Image (cartoon, rainbow, N blue to C red):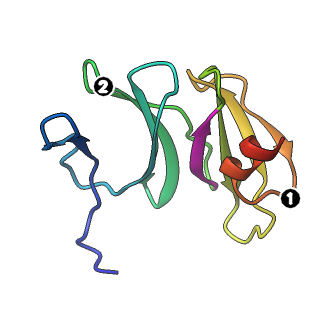
Amino acid sequence: MDENFHSQLFLLDLADITISQLTDDQYSYRTPRWSPVSDEIIFTKKVDDYGRIFLLKYSDMLQVQLTSTNGVNDSYPSWTNDGQWIVFNRTEPDDKNEPIWIMKTDGSEQRQIIEHGRSPDLFLKYR
């Protein structure tokens, strides 16, 4: 992939078929998910060569970084059905286990819940 390519977040309003760009910077944004209970979006953004999980409050467009552990990639965030927790993968560079972690929506109470995971989305569907 081109090093100068940076994916951004957009919003498609189905009512009037308009597209709004939510981000416009030097970062690449991945795996956005709307909260099931609020106007918040979680996503992965690559910062300093590592995936970090952020929360964007759509009402004021404020981005809040939720994860920042050195030497690991955080990715594939998903909401719990009640919107109180975020489930995600946290991996070290050579880790093939893809453990699943959970945290509160403010980034607190981060802890591993499954050692050999794959997809937080599948975990939430079939638990």
Q: Nearer the viewer, mark 1 or mark 2?
A: 2
Name the residue tied to disc 1.
116
Give the farthest residue toward the bottom: 1
Quadrant housing residue 39: top left
Residue positioned 53% across, 32% down in the render? 66
Mark 2: few/some/many CA within 10 Å (<14, 14-19, 20+): some
Residue positioned 59% across, 23% down in the render? 83
Name the residue tied to disc 2.
58
Magenta-colored span: 72-79
Q: Secondary structure at mark 1?
A: loop
Mark 1: few/some/many CA within 10 Å (<14, 14-19, 20+): few
Q: Is residue 94 above or below residue 36?
A: below
Which comes sooner in the sequence, label 1 or label 2? 2
Q: Quadrant of the N terminus?
A: bottom left
Q: Amino acid at mark 1?
A: His
Quadrant housing residue 104: top right
Q: CA distance from mark 1 to mark 2?
A: 33 Å
Quadrant housing residue 111: top right
Residue positioned 51% across, 54% down in the render? 51
Give coordinates of residue 99: x percent, y percent. Answer: 78, 53
Q: Nearer the viewer, residue 21 or 55?
A: 21
Q: Secondary structure at mark 2?
A: loop
Q: Nearer the viewer, residue 92 or 84?
A: 84
